[in-house]
C-alpha cells in the first residue's frame, strides 16, 4: 500500500468526526505496521488524540482481519500447520501421492477447525447479543442499585498449626516441577481457569498496556466512544486488589496476604471455609464471561459486575481472556513472564501495544532489578530463627535442611555486608589501601555466589522450596500472631512494612540470582545509614525481556507523546531486529507553529554566559543571575509559569540563596510562588492552590500587582509527568540546565560500563546524554496540552545551543523552530510580542 495515498482505508472516528491529517497519518502507519508484523515506535504529542488514533487504527485492522473470507482463513491455517511440521511436506524423496495425501489431510483439518471456529463465534455472538438487549432493557427499566457484598462465613481462624509448613520431600527439580504442575491443574479444575471451562475459542487480540489503572480507564473511556464499542469483546485486567470482592480478603493490608488468603479460600474444604464467590458451575462462569464481553467496562465496572452477580471478578476476568478481542492491562502484567503465564496470556499471533512507552526501558530494568537491604536481612534472619526455635521439633525431612540452609545464606549476606563496610572504613581512615569493591563494583551472579561462600547450597532448590512451602507467609503469620517483634532496629529513619514478609524479599533476590537467561550483575551499595546498605541485583539489558515478547507477538507497538531520543529504543530494545522490521513514526503537533515560542538562552540577566554544569551551578553569581532572569521573564509571561530544576536538593539550595539575596522577593512581587512538595500526598493540594492563585493572584490583597503564579518543580519529580498544565496553568515553561543524572550512582556506573562493553550500539556517553534528554523532554511536554493551547518555552543553558542536544528535543519543538537570542532583552522582546499576538488573536476570535 502506498503511504502517500490513504484513500484505500477509511478509519471510523467517533461521532462521525473527520480525523485530523496527523491522526489519519498515525492510524495509517499503525495499520500498516501491524499488517506487516513489524515493531513500531510511534510519537504523537499530547493533545493530538494519540489514544483515539491508536484505538481506531488498531481496531480497524482487527475488524478487517476477522472479516476475511472463509477460504482466506483456511489457506492461512494450512500455511500455519505446514510451518509447524517437523518434516518438509514437499520432500522430493517422498512419492508424489504421499505428499499429496499429506497436504490433503492438512487442508481437511484446517477446514474443519476454521468452520468449527466460525460456528462457535457465531453462537457466542448470538449469546452476547441477547445479553446486550437484556442489559439495555434493565438499564432503561430501573436505576442501578448500590451493590454491597455481605461478608460470608469464609474467614478461617488461624491457630499455631496453620503456620507449620507441610512436610516437604521434593529433592529434585523434576519432582518440584511435577508438583507445581499438579497444583496448577487442581486449581484450574476447581476454579475454571482453563478456556475449555467457558467453551470460548481463542480470539485474535490486541493487548493494550499502560502504566497506571487511571490511564487504562481513560483508554477504556475512549474505546466507548468508537463505533466498535457495540461489538468489540473487551476486558480490563487487574490485580486481586482491584478486583477481589470478598470483604474478608479486602480487609487484609497487603497484596501478598490477600493472595495467600485467596488461595487458601479456594482450597478450603466444605462450603463454610471456601470463598462463596468462586463459580461452582460452568454455566455460571460462562454467563459471567458473556456479561463481561457484552459491553465495554473499565476495572471499576468489572468489580461492580462481580458484586452484582456474586461471582469473583478476579478469576472471572482471567477466564474471559480467551474470548476477548481487546485486553487492557498494566505494564507489569505484560512484562513479567511469570505473571503472563499465571494469567494464561498467550501472545502468539496477537498485537501488543505499550502506550506511554517513553519509560519502558526503565520499567523493564526496575521490574527485574531487586534490592535486599540490611535491615530486611536482619529481620528475615531474626524471624526465621524464632520460627525455627518454635517449630524445630515438629518439622520433618527437608524442611529442617532447607530452613538451616536459608539461615546460612542470610548469615553469609550479613557477613559480606559487614566486611565490605569495614573495608570502606579502613580505606577512609588510611589504614588500608585496599579498594572497597562492594561500594560500586558489580559482579556476575555466579561470582557473587562463589564469594558469598554458599556455592555448596543448591539455590534452585531453595527457590523451589520457598515457592512451594510458602515459608515466607508462614513465618510472617507466626510473627504477627505471636509476640515476636516484627522489627530488629528501633531506628526511626527505617520504615518497615509490617505486613510484607521479609523472607519474600530474600526469595525475590535468590530468584534474580538464578535467572541466568538475563544480563544481570550483583553489587553492594553502602549507604550513610548502615541499615539502608543493600545488595542490588541490577538488570543491565532489557533486550532479552523485550525480545521474548516480540518473538511471540505478531506486532509490538511502542507509543508515547515524547519518544525522543528514538535512537535509545533502537539500541536498548530493538537491536536484535533487522532494520526493515522496525518502523519509526513521529507526527508534528496539532497546534500551529505560531502557538509555540521556544527560546534558547545562553546568557543570563548579567549578559554573561550561563551554564549549569556540576562545576558551575553552585556558584553564587550563577544562581543570582538565574534569579534575575526568571524574575524578568515573570514580568512578561502572563498567568502561570512552571520552572524545572534538575533535583530537589538544587531547587532547595537555589531557593535559599534567592531568599537571602532578595531575588525571591522580586519574583514574589510579580507571581505567587509555589514549590513542588516532596510528599506525594501534598501534590494535589499544591496544584489546587497554584491553580487558584493563577485565577485570582491578588485575592485578599488590596492593590496587589501580581500577574499569576510560578511553580518550581523537579525534572523526574511528581509534576514532570502525568500532570495536565494546560492553558493558563503553564503559559511559560522554564528549563534550568540539563538534568544529567549523578555519575556517582553505582548502578549508573555499572550500566555505562556494560554499554561500552557491547560491540554494536551506542556509547556510554550517548546513553548518559539520552537519559538526560528523555527526562527533559517529558518535562517540557507539559507545555502544550490541546489544539488551542499556546506557551513559551525557555531553555536556560549555553549547552542548548549545540546541535547535538537540539537534535534530541521533541520533533514538534524543532519543527516550530528554536530561537537564539543574544541577550535577555531579546528574549523579553520576543516573549512580549508572542503574548501580544495571542491576545489579539483571542480577542478577534471572540468578536
Image (cartoon, rainbow, N blue to C red):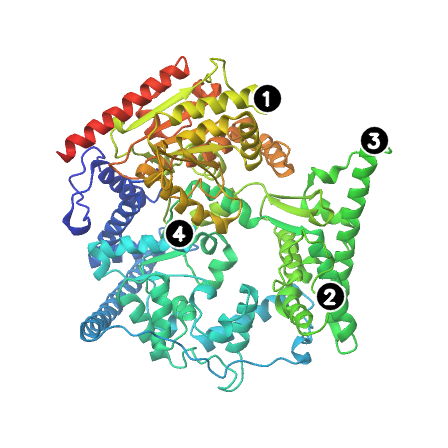
Q: Quadrant of the N terminus?
A: top left
In the figure, is residue 479 to the left or right of 573? Answer: right
Work out whether mark 4 precedes mark 1 in sequence or the reverse, and give the earlier one: 4
Pick the front one: 759 or 501 = 501
Per the image, the residue denoted by label 1 is 619
Work out whether mark 1 precedes mark 2 in sequence or the reverse, and give the earlier one: 2
Tell me the residue at 22%/70% (across/down). Answer: 132
Per the image, the residue denoted by label 4 is 209
Q: Is residue 784 in view from this perspective?
A: yes
Q: Identify the secondary structure beneath mark 3.
A: loop
Pick the front one: 201 or 269 = 269
Q: Nearer the viewer, mark 1 or mark 2?
A: 1
Tell me the residue at 54%/70% (across/down). Answer: 252
Give above or below for 395 relative to 673.
below
Work out whether mark 2 precedes mark 3 in sequence or the reverse, and give the earlier one: 2
Give above or below for 417 relative to 405.
above
Q: How far apart in space, not on screen, are marks 4 and 2 (Cα)?
A: 39 Å
Per the image, the residue denoted by label 3 is 433
Mark identifier at residue 384? 2
Q: Identify the secondary structure beneath mark 2.
A: helix
Amino acid at each position: 500500500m502506498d503511504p502517500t495515498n490513504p484513500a484505500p482505508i477509511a478509519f471510523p472516528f467517533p461521532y462521525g468526526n473527520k480525523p485530523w491529517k496527523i491522526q489519519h497519518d498515525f492510524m495509517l502507519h499503525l495499520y500498516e505496521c501491524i499488517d506487516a508484523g513489524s515493531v513500531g515506535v510511534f510519537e504523537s504529542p499530547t493533545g493530538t488524540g494519540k489514544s483515539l488514533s491508536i484505538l481506531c487504527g488498531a481496531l480497524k485492522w482487527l475488524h478487517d482481519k476477522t472479516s476475511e473470507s472463509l477460504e482466506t482463513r483456511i489457506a492461512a491455517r494450512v500455511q500455519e500447520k505446514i510451518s509447524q511440521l517437523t518434516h518438509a511436506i514437499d520432500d522430493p524423496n517422498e512419492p508424489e501421492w504421499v505428499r499429496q495425501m499429506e497436504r490433503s489431510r492438512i487442508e481437511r483439518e484446517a477446514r474443519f477447525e476454521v468452520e468449527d471456529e466460525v460456528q462457535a463465534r457465531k453462537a457466542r455472538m448470538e449469546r452476547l447479543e441477547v445479553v446486550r438487549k437484556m442489559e439495555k432493557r434493565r438499564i432503561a427499566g430501573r436505576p442501578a442499585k448500590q451493590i454491597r457484598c455481605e461478608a460470608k462465613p469464609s474467614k478461617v481462624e488461624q491457630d499455631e498449626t496453620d503456620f507449620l509448613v507441610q512436610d516437604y520431600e521434593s529433592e529434585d527439580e523434576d519432582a518440584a516441577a511435577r508438583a507445581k504442575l499438579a497444583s496448577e491443574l487442581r486449581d484450574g479444575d476447581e476454579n475454571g481457569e482453563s478456556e475449555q471451562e467457558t467453551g470460548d475459542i481463542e480470539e485474535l487480540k490486541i493487548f493494550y498496556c499502560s502504566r497506571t489503572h487511571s490511564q487504562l480507564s481513560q483508554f477504556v473511556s475512549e474505546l466507548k466512544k468508537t463505533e466498535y464499542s457495540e461489538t468489540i469483546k473487551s476486558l480490563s485486567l487487574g490485580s486481586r486488589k482491584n478486583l477481589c470482592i470478598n470483604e474478608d480478603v479486602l480487609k487484609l493490608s497487603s497484596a501478598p496476604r490477600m493472595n495467600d488468603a485467596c488461595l487458601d479460600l479456594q482450597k478450603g474444604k466444605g462450603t463454610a471455609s471456601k470463598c462463596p464467590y468462586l463459580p461452582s458451575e460452568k454455566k455460571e462462569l460462562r454467563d459471567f464471561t458473556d456479561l463481561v464481553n457484552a459491553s465495554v467496562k473499565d476495572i471499576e465496572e468489572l468489580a461492580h459486575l462481580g458484586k452484582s452477580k456474586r461471582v469473583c471478578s478476579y478469576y472471572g476476568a482471567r477466564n474471559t481472556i480467551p474470548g476477548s478481542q481487546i485486553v487492557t492491562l498494566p505494564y507489569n502484567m505484560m512484562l513479567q513472564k511469570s505473571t503472563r503465564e499465571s494469567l494464561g496470556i498467550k501472545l502468539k499471533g496477537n498485537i501488543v501495544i505499550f502506550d506511554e512507552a517513553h519509560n519502558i526501558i526503565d520499567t523493564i530494568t526496575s521490574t527485574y532489578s531487586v534490592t535486599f537491604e540490611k535491615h530486611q536481612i536482619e529481620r528475615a534472619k531474626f524471624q526465621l530463627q524464632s520460627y525455627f526455635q518454635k517449630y524445630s521439633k515438629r518439622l520433618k525431612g527437608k524442611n529442617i535442611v532447607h530452613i538451616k540452609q536459608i539461615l546460612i545464606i542470610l548469615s553469609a549476606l550479613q557477613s559480606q555486608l559487614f566486611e565490605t563496610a569495614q573495608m570502606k572504613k579502613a580505606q577512609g581512615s588510611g589504614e588500608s589501601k585496599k579498594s572497597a569493591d562492594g561500594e560500586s563494583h558489580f559482579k556476575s551472579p555466579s561470582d557473587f555466589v562463589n564469594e558469598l561462600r554458599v556455592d555448596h547450597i543448591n539455590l534452585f532448590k531453595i527457590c523451589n522450596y520457598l515457592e512451594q512451602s510458602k515459608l515466607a507467609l508462614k513465618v510472617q503469620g507466626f510473627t504477627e500472631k505471636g509476640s515476636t517483634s516484627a522489627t530488629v532496629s528501633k531506628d526511626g529513619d527505617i520504615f518497615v512494612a509490617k505486613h510484607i514478609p521479609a523472607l519474600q524479599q530474600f526469595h525475590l533476590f535468590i530468584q534474580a540470582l538464578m535467572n541466568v537467561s538475563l544480563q544481570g550483575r550483583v553489587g553492594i551499595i553502602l549507604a550513610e545509614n548502615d541499615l539502608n546498605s543493600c545488595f542490588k541485583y541490577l538488570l543491565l539489558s532489557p533486550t532479552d525481556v523485550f525480545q521474548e515478547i516480540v518473538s511471540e507477538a505478531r506486532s509490538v507497538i511502542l507509543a508515547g507523546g515524547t519518544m525522543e531520543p528514538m535512537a535509545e529504543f533502537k539500541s536498548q530494545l530493538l537491536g536484535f531486529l533487522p532494520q526493515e522490521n522496525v518502523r519509526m513514526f513521529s507526527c508534528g503537533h496539532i497546534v500551529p507553529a505560531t502557538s509555540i515560542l521556544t527560546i534558547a538562552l545562553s546568557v543570563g540577566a548579567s549578559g554573561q554566559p550561563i551554564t549549569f554544569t556540576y562545576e558551575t551551578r553552585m556558584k553564587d553569581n550563577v544562581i543570582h543571575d538565574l534569579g534575575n532572569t526568571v524574575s524578568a521573564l515573570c514580568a512578561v509571561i502572563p498567568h502561570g509559569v512552571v520552572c524545572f530544576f534538575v533535583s530537589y536538593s538544587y531547587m532547595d539550595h537555589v531557593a535559599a540563596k534567592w531568599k537571602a539575596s532578595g531575588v525571591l522577593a522580586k519574583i514574589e512581587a510579580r507571581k505567587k510562588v509555589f514549590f513542588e512538595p516532596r510528599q506525594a500526598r501534598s501534590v494535589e493540594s499544591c496544584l489546587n492552590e497554584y491553580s487558584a492563585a493563577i485565577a485570582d493572584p491578588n485575592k485578599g490583597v488590596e492593590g496587589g500587582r501580581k500577574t499569576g503564579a510560578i511553580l518550581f518543580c523537579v525534572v523526574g519529580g511528581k509534576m514532570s509527568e502525568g500532570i495536565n498544565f494546560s492553558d493558563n496553568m503553564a503559559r511559560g515553561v522554564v528549563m534550568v540546565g540539563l538534568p544529567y543524572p549523578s555519575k556517582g550512582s553505582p548502578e549508573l556506573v555499572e550500566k555505562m560500563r556494560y554499554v561500552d562493553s557491547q560491540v554494536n550500539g551506542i556509547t556510554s556517553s550517548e546513553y548518559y546524554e539520552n537519559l538526560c534528554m528523555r527526562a527533559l523532554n517529558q518535562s517540557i511536554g507539559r507545555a502544550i496540552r490541546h489544539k488551542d493551547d499556546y506557551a513559551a518555552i525557555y531553555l536556560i543553558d549555553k549547552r542548548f545551543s549545540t546541535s547535538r542536544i537540539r537534535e534530541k528535543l521533541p520533533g514538534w519543538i524543532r519543527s516550530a523552530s528554536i530561537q537564539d537570542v543574544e541577550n535577555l532583552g531579546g528574549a523579553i522582546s520576543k516573549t512580549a510580542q508572542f503574548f501580544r499576538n495571542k491576545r489579539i488573536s483571542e480577542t478577534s476570535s471572540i468578536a
